Amino acid sequence: MSETVLIAETGRSTGSAESRRLRRDDRIPAVVYGLGMAPVSVSIARRDLRIALSGPAGNNTILDLTVDGTVYPAIVKEMQRHPVRRTVQHVDFIQIDLSKEITVSVPVRMEGTAKAVHDEGGLVDLRRNELEVSTTPRNIPDEIVIDVSDMDMDSTITIGDVAAPAGVTIVGEPDWAVVTVLTMRTPVLDDEDAEAAEAAEAEAAEGDAEGDAAAEGDAAASDDDAGE
């Protein structure tokens, strides 16, 4: 788990107008709290935040959040984004005790190829892009990797099936599905069923042709009657 320094500035006024002014200056309003401290309103440079969270740990990066010379070990608790532009609008930092367990969300990545599923026209479906885990801050994994190679059409991988790294506990009910299999096309018919399907299609086509001919005959008769 990586750690990086992030400088925060205090002294910002609260309120929507002040927040908009900060964002125009490419700064992000934020707050830091936790471990019994009174919440402190701060601001951070947008570029500095992007760099600080650009490593493999992402939002779970342990930050040495420096506020007026005081360093708070912290992680991102919540990040609010603009509903359209998706730019970061506000950040909640929570101070952490590096020796105590915390609960965070960790991304899930599948590896391997489920050949049995592919051969049957199925699709491996990742139901949960993230899993909540409980562990000490420096032990937070960058990701949870799930091998899907042995899956078949009847397979489901649940939370109880996922192997967590040492010292990490996955939070959730053991029977919650994480990876499932979707059926993407109808099964291949055997020779007998295929012949029956072809015969049915031919019969339907013949019926359509007879119907078209009858309709044309009726139309011609109507034209003759109209001519008389």
Image (cartoon, rainbow, N blue to C red):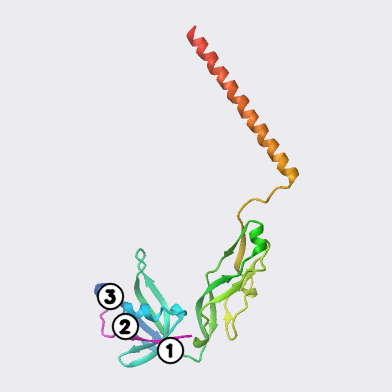
The percent position of residue 139, horizontal first and vertical second, equals: 53, 86
Helix, strand or loop at disc 2? strand
Helix, strand or loop at disc 3? loop
Q: Amino acid at mark 2?
A: Ser
State which mark lies toward you, 1 or 3: 3
Name above or below for residue 93 compared with residue 68: above
Crowding at dot 3, Cα within 10 Å, few <14 / some 14-19 / many 20+, comes out as: few
The percent position of residue 84, horizontal first and vertical second, equals: 35, 63
Crowding at dot 2, Cα within 10 Å, few <14 / some 14-19 / many 20+, comes out as: some
The alpha-carbon separation of the residues under discs 1 and 2 comes to: 16 Å
Marks 1,3: beta carbons within 8 A: no
Image disc number at residue 41:
2
Image disc number at residue 35:
1
The percent position of residue 67, horizontal first and vertical second, equals: 32, 89
At horizontal 44% and vertical 82% (from top left) the residue drawn is 61
List the residue tagged with mark 3.
26
Residue 5 lies within the magenta run: yes
Q: Nearer the viewer, residue 15 or 129?
A: 129
The earlier-in-sequence mark between 1 and 3 is 3
At horizontal 47% and vertical 79% (from top left) the residue drawn is 56
Residue 12 lies within the magenta run: yes
The earlier-in-sequence mark between 3 and 2 is 3
221 lies left or right of 26: right
The answer to whether residue 29 of the structure is visible from this angle is no
Spot the residue most to the top.
Answer: 228
Q: Amino acid at mark 1?
A: Leu
The alpha-carbon separation of the residues under discs 3 and 2 comes to: 17 Å
Name above or below for residue 206 compared with residue 128: above
The percent position of residue 220, horizontal first and vertical second, equals: 53, 15
Name above or below for residue 135 compared with residue 158: below
Q: Which residues are magenta?
A: 1-13
The earlier-in-sequence mark between 1 and 2 is 1
